[in-house]
Image (tube, helix red, strand yellow):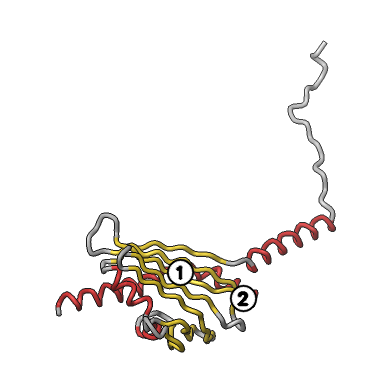
Amino acid sequence: MLLGRRIPLYTYRSLPTISHNSRRSLFKYVLEKEKERLQAVQKYTLLKTVNALPTQVYDVVSEIDRYKEFIPYCVDSFIDKRDSKTGQPTEAGLRIGFKKYDEKFSCDVVCLSQPDKQYYTVEASSISHNLFQTLSTKWSIIPHPRKPHVSQVELVLKFQFHSLLYNSVSSIFADNVTKLAMGAFAQRAEELAALRELN
């Protein structure tokens, strides 16, 4: 007979306890993974439509000594060496200032202009190893496939600081700073294109 019996509605089981050593191991594992993430090369890719001809965008990107005139936080820009045939920069650099950070670095630069293919690139790789373990940018500029007199621009930025602190800070701000820089280049190219039309 079931009348005198109580049927339990729930069955309680004790959960396995996590030892102090296990918690410490888990915490250590999470810290190591975060350290690995911060020490990895960070990569950002941006695509933007710019209302200027590819040649005009290429001129803005390759004139590195003029970056200080329009890029936020760029307090100085310079060209140390130029190609004897093309006059394009082969070694150049920037000085970036933001609050208490003030850093100067130089890069090897390769500028490629192919007007017959309507394809232009500017690549830069850091040769200043005191700040960056890795720093490279590549600009690719082509005509927009559907809009005349308009460019399609791709910027690929890769970097890794020696400092874990800088990597940590940059992982928070890099995406916004990259977009800010791309916007500054686009605005500069469009302003110069508008001025040329007026003249």
- Residue 159's disc is none
Mark 1 or mark 2, which is nearer the start of the sequence?
2
Does 3 appear above or below 49?
Answer: above
Q: Mark 2: which amino acid?
A: Gln
In the foreground, 112 or 9: 112
- Would residue 28 appear left or right of 112 to someone viewing this image? right
Residue at image mark 1: 138
In the foreground, 149 or 88: 88
Instruction: Tell me what residue is drawn at x 80 percent, y 58 percent.
Output: 25
State the residue lying farthest toward the top.
Answer: 1
Image quarter where the C terminus lies is bottom left
Quarter occupied by residue 144: bottom left
For the residues labelled 2 and 1, say whether their Cβ atoms are less than 8 Å apart. no
What is the tally of numbered marks visible in this picture? 2
Q: Position of residue 182 (x, y in %)?
A: 39, 70
Mark 2 vs mark 1, foreground winner is 1
Q: Residues within 10 Å of mark 2 (few under 14, many from 20)?
A: some
Does 177 appear above or below 106?
Answer: above
Q: Position of residue 171 (x, y in %)?
A: 56, 68
| Element under disc 1 | strand
State the residue lying farthest toward the front.
Answer: 85
Q: Position of residue 89 (x, y in %)?
A: 42, 82
Q: Position of residue 177 (x, y in %)?
A: 45, 72
| Element under disc 2 | strand
Instruction: Tell me what residue is drawn at x 82 percent, y 16 percent.
Output: 4
Q: Mark 1: which amino acid?
A: Lys
Quarter occupied by residue 49: bottom left
- Residue 133's disc is 2
